[in-house]
Image: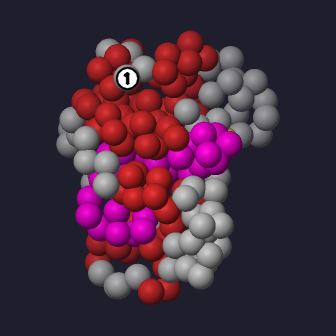
Amino acid sequence: MKSGDPNIAIRWWRQLQPYWPDGTVNHTADRGALARLRRDDLFAAMTEPATLALFRDLGRGHDLPEVALCAAVLASVRKDRHEHPMRTLGPPSLNQPDDGIMKPLRFRGLISADALDERLTALRAAIRLAGTELNVCELAAACLDWSEDRQRHWVFQFYNAGAAAPASDSMEDLQ
């Protein structure tokens, strides 16, 4: 993934939100675009002007369906959290796999979702489970680059086993 892409998506997401992070009203927010993107399927999200603006801002290197996935997923997030989404949703430890907000079976469905529309459904469900509060940067990065390294990183984060993760050059980029 190109450097800076998640930051572009974060900026795009913030500009659509009704409030700025400091709680002041965002007078340029687009609540209508957020509402449409929250319920759009992937094809409808591709035709949304806000998605096309994100596509333009990201520049070359991404396909419109990936950007539409990113827009539709981020539109469902109401508040940005700093911890990895899988730490928010996963169990406290490997010894307590069923104690997380997201159960292991649902997590396996998310990780194995190869089709973009399946991933959209799974990520929206994860966002709902988290009370619409997840890490916007990591969600954007995952939507734009669902690589095997990222999936592996999500597995280690979900089970709170990051210390056991194998070291690799590409993993450093994901943290």
Vertical side of 104 occupied by 138: above or below: above
Q: Is residue 151 magenta?
A: yes
Q: Position of residue 50 (x, y in %)?
A: 43, 20
Secondary structure mainly formed by the magenta segment: helix
The answer to whether one can see residue 84 in this image is no
Q: Is residue 145 above or below residue 50?
A: below
- The answer to whether 63 appears left or right of 132 in the picture is left
Q: Residue at x 60, y 67 (%)?
A: 98
Residue 49, how many percent across, how many down? 39, 15
Task: Using the image, determine if residue 144 lies above or below residue 76.
Answer: below
**Where is residue 75 drawn, in percent x and y?**
52, 30
Q: Position of residue 6 (x, y in %)?
A: 42, 48
| Residue at x-position 29% and y-position 72% | 170
Residue at the spot of label 1 = 41
Is residue 129 rendered magenta in the image?
Answer: yes
Q: Name the foreground residue: 18 vs 147.
A: 147
| Horizontal relation, residue 4 to residue 83: left or right | left
Q: Specify the quadrant of the image occupied by residue 34.
A: top right
Quarter the C terminus occupies: bottom left
Region in magenta: 126-155
Is residue 20 visible to us here? Answer: yes
Image point (42%, 20%), residue name: 40
Crowdedness of circle 1 by 10 Å Cα count: few (<14), some, many (20+)?
A: some
- Residue situated in front as seen by the camera: 28 or 100: 100
* Amino acid of disc 1: Asp
Indicate the quadrant where residue 45 lies.
Answer: top left
